[in-house]
Amino acid sequence: MANLDAKSLQSQLKSGNLTNLYYIYGSDTLAVSQTVQKILKAASGGETDAVTKLDGANLNVSTLADEAELCPMFAEYNCIWVHDLNMDGVREDVRKSVMEILKNVGSQTVLLFDVTGFDIYGGKTGKKRQPTDKNKKIIDYILKNGTVCICEPRSVNQCAADLIAAAKKAGCMMDRPAAVALATQCGCQSLLLRQEMGKLCAYAAGGEITEQMIRDMVTPQLETTVYALTNAIVRRKSRDAMRSVDELLAMRVEMQYLLATVGGSLLDVQRACAARQSGKNVQDMKADFGYRFDFMVENAFKSSMGDTLTHVSNCLKLLVDAEKRLHSGAVDERVLFEKTIVQMLRG
């Protein structure tokens, strides 16, 4: 029936339009949790006793079936919340029973599934990643017969506006460049932004939250640090690049994954170069390659200037060579990574 984002679902709830089946997931786990609470409040009328919560990791399908058949007594809907049911981790008979229960949910029951505690993508990455097959089966069924909501990070501009408002509410000042820097640094993740804003507001103590404070106090994230590295490589800024290299190595990420992440970031820039040369814009590239987030494409476009295409192509060849050496025998991974980055800066 509907595949919505968190904002669209909130509008649907405000209009009083409830469905009997919900599935909420996405990489923005705070947004998932907040969306779940809004659905539960709408379905139960604010009566917490009217909500039955079941642990998906230890789900008893008989209990779920019994609860789904109950009629509400003190609220308009019988509300059941199943948290973190991983269809990959249960027996085939359990999967079949859950699907059968879905088919028989009554009109006075709201059955809600949400995911925050496991990787529904099964470790897959990329712009077009999908939930694992067994989880996708239940999602597809609910998509046809209820509502699926994917809570992914918002755009940098949306997050920046919220950050400025949050700083003002806390009695602090924050200009737009600082807000954009924080949103970018945290990958627009709501939970991380909330944590970092609390720390920054406490430190600012009614003063201004500056970009320097953000650089000094906010914990580096893999994706944003890789973007900083890519941007420095493209612009041949050696000092900035090696600073990012030190931060990435300090994260102790598996080298194979780190090389793949840097390669993905460079591929974004390569696509942006090709799009720019073809007269395409950010939205064209987002649509053509299935990107979910505007800021990823916007960042790539910012880096796709001048002779970037040739440079990036050479960098990708260097990464391929580095990965071959990584698997060809014993190597010092740190030295391999640092040498590869230096060669990219010279290329």
Image (cartoon, rainbow, N blue to C red):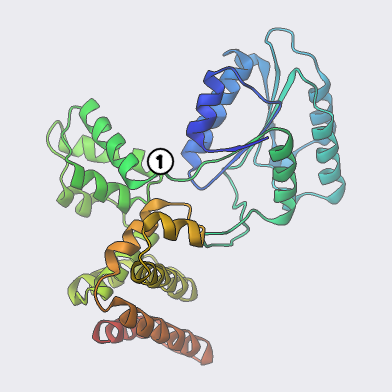
Residue 7 drawn above or below residue 156: above
Residue designated by label 1: 190
Q: Residues within 10 Å of mark 1 (few under 14, many from 20)?
A: many
Residue situated in front as seen by the camera: 250 or 52:
52
The x, y position of residue 124, in whole percent, is 58, 62
Residue sitting at the far top: 74
Residue situated in front as seen by the camera: 148 or 26:
148
Residue 313 drawn above or below residue 249: below
Horizontal side of residue 226 vs 19, given as left or right: left
Horizontal side of residue 17 vs 272, given as left or right: right
Location of residue 65 (image quadrant) = top right
Q: What amino acid type is highlighted by mark number 1?
A: Ser
Residue sitting at the far front: 279
Residue 311 drawn above or below residue 97: below
Residue at 32 percent of width and 57 percent of height = 220
The x, y position of residue 126, in whole percent, is 52, 62
The quarter of the image holding the C terminus is bottom left
Residue 227 seen in this snapshot: yes
Residue at 50 percent of width and 88 percent of height = 324
Secondary element under disc 1, as helix, strand or loop, is helix
Residue at 55 percent of width and 18 percent of height = 15
